[in-house]
Amino acid sequence: MKHKSIRKKLPSSGAIYGIILFVLLFSVTIPGYMTVSNLSNIIRQSAVLCFISMCSCLAILTNQTDLSCGAISGFAACVAAKAMNGGSSIAAGCLIGLAAALAIGAVNGLLAGFTEIPTFIITLATMSIAESLGMVLQGGTIHIPYESFQLLSEGNILYIPIPALLVAALYIGMNYILKHRRYGTYLYAVGGKEDAAWTSGIHVKKIKLSVYLINAALAAAAGFIYAARLSAANPSQGNGLELNGICAAVLGQYEVTPHL
């Protein structure tokens, strides 16, 4: 019985063991891999993917797809960088970039909630639109004139990287919402069976709209962190992030889903 209980506590996904194996292998073969500076650099770089994977997680949780989050992150960063170059402060530039991201998120949510178009098609289209709009803004890389903006990616609070603190706050907050708040229950209900959710009084269309608005905000945050690391924004900087986010979300859900 004890062996069975221990076996149940062990991770069931092979990805966890693969990560452990690669960390051990790199620690032995690559000098300085386990140093504080290298681990800090890995944490800073992975923060962007953590935000994007949360976007994918919320979409998958509600039985939807979001292929636009990577492109939205690049577009939001470009809009913010353009505003900063036009004289806006860092806060104002980020708010403008966030508003631009929310506009595309609203398009995703309205089409997903109030039409019968598959979300795969919707978000595939808005992915192309977001990247194209970013190209129209500048046509390439947009330099960010404020050196202090780099602190969003390179700064520390009590020796802890700021991106790590942002990711921790995001995951703790979302875990609390999904497990302990009514909104989290609604998300699971919509993803489980829409008809049953409608019958129980849940406004499915509004829930779908809210998911894409949240995703747009998270994607914008990811874009700002990425741009802070580069001190510049590029409309194609988020290319491929959505696929990595989906992969991370699927692996994570496989790990936490009980096997019946």
Image: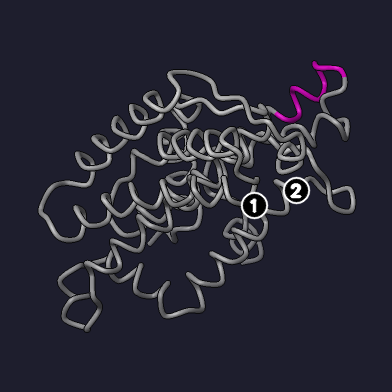
Task: Residue 232 in the image: state x and y as whole percent.
Answer: 61, 27
Report the residue at 66% width, 34% height from top. Answer: 45
Quarter of the rendering containing residue 136: top left
Label 2: which secondary element: helix
Taking the magenta stretch, the answer to whether it contains residue 27 is yes
Quarter of the image for the C terminus: give it. bottom left
Q: Residues within 10 Å of mark 2 (few under 14, many from 20)?
A: many
Which residue is denoted by mark 1 in the rendering?
Answer: 167
Residue 74 x/y as whole percent? 47, 33
Q: Is residue 107 above or below residue 78?
A: below
Q: Amino acid at mark 1?
A: Val
Which of 222/19 is in front? 222
Q: Which residue is mark 2?
A: 162
Q: Amino acid at mark 2?
A: Ile
Pointers 1 and 2 in contact (C-beta within 8 Å): no
Label 1 and label 2: CA atoms lie apart by 9 Å
Q: Which residues are magenta?
A: 23-31
